[in-house]
Image (cartoon, helix red, strand yellow):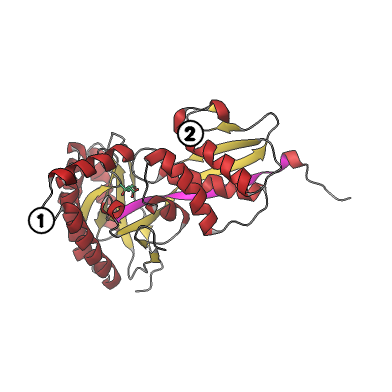
């Protein structure tokens, strides 16, 4: 007896993960480089099944018809529409189920990761191969709805599993690690808004006109960080991260709580610490010298009022 799968039972699945910018956020919007890291422990899973009577969505914010979903989900609706067109799909109704561990609005790449997982699931339900170019094109639609003019760094980071050297408009380079990176990522109690933070940085830069700007200094710090990373010189990398935080603070996007979390991590022996992502709330990242210190820094940040704390280790099988 052969078993035939009913079309209604067909399910497509897609996954993606969060990201943390090690150095270069905001400067990346102006064409400068950034180093971005995958945060594989925090993940998004999207399932796409077939539905009768139009598209439906089930996520934290809304359960119901996609066309009646709140404005914040409009980017996902646009992605579904464009994917349907690109796939020349004959499937009339999808049921989208989104389960995400990435807190939205905390600079950890939530919106891009959801979009990446959604596109993967939509192509999977059609049993259609998906190129990185097609993926990025569709994710860009969602990111434009979410952030205005994204640099594209979040979409790349959510869809690749290794550290990247990212320059807007270019194919990113993967960065090998000589030694494991013991990181602590923590979110402050206040979410940020990327679109607004990017606008505030623009206004700060207009005010600071003349001479070398914080964005130029961030670019120089990112280049030195790449060298430090390639040498496995994490003491230097940490100093550069802290230096980047000072530049981001000069741009006006470090809140008191982010400054307090950065200070607490440094006092506890972190090699460096900075805000990560768009700032004005959101998250920070610290680099620890070893596993022990990583756990101590994490505990300190929880005591200092961080909402959530993660302790990812990157490159455990590194080449060094
Ligand atoms: C957001 O994760 C990073 C920013 O540089 C904005 C962007 O690159 O699109 C603040």
Q: Residue at x 15, y 53 (%)?
A: 213
Q: Which residue is mark 2?
A: 73
Quadrant position of residue 90 = top right
Q: CA distance from mark 1 to mark 2?
A: 41 Å
Q: Residue at x 39, y 46 (%)?
A: 109
- Quadrant of the image containing the C terminus: bottom left
Q: Residue at x 78, y 45 (%)?
A: 5
Closer to the camera in the image, 35 or 231? 35
Residue 103: tell me if it is visible.
no
- Tell me the element at label 1: loop
The x, y position of residue 249, in whole percent, is 16, 45
Identify the magenta region: 9-22
Closer to the camera in the image, 88 or 275? 88
Q: Are marks 1 and 2 in contact (CB under 8 Å)?
A: no
Task: Give the left or right position of residue 61, taking residue 309 as reference.
Answer: right
Q: How many marks?
A: 2
Q: Which residue is mark 1?
A: 211
Magenta stretch mostly in which secondary structure? strand
The x, y position of residue 177, in whole percent, is 35, 68
- Looking at marks 1 and 2 on the same chain, the residue that comes earlier in the sequence is marked by 2
Mark 2 Cα shell of 10 Å, populated few (<14), some (14-19), many (≥20): many
* Residue at the extreme left: 211
Say which mark, if any, is on residue 87: none
């Amino acid at each position: 007896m052969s078993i035939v799968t009913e079309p209604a039972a067909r399910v497509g699945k897609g996954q993606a993960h969060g990201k943390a910018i090690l150095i270069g956020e905001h400067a990346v919007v102006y064409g400068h480089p950034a180093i971005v890291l995958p945060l594989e422990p925090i993940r998004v899973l999207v399932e796409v099944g077939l539905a009768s009577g139009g598209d439906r969505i089930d996520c934290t914010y809304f359960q119901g018809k996609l066309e009646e979903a709140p404005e914040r989900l409009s980017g996902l609706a646009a992605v579904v529409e464009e994917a349907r067109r690109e796939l020349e799909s004959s499937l009339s109704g999808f049921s989208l189920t989104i389960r995400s561990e990435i807190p939205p609005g905390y600079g950890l790449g939530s919106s891009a990761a959801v979009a990446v997982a959604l596109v993967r699931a939509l192509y999977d339900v059609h049993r259609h191969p998906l190129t990185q170019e097609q993926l990025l094109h569709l994710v860009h639609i969602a990111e434009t709805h979410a952030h205005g003019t994204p640099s594209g760094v979040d979409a790349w980071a959510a869809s690749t599993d290794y550290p990247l050297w990212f320059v807007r408009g270019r194919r990113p380079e993967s960065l090998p690690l000589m030694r494991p990176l013991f990181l602590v990522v923590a979110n402050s109690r206040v979410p940020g808004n990327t679109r607004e933070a990017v606008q505030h940085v623009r206004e700060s830069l207009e005010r600071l006109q003349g001479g070398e700007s914080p964005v130029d200094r961030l670019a120089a710090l990112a280049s030195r960080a790449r060298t430090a990373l390639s040498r496995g010189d994490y003491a230097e990398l940490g100093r550069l991260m802290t230096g980047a935080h000072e530049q981001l603070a000069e741009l006006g996007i470090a809140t008191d709580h982010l400054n307090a979390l950065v200070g607490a991590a440094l006092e506890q022996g972190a090699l460096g610490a900075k805000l990560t992502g768009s700032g004005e709330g959101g998250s920070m990242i610290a680099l620890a010298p070893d596993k022990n210190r990583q756990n101590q820094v994490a505990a300190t940040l929880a005591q200092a009022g961080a909402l959530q704390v993660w302790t990812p280790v990157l490159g455990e099988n590194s080449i060094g």
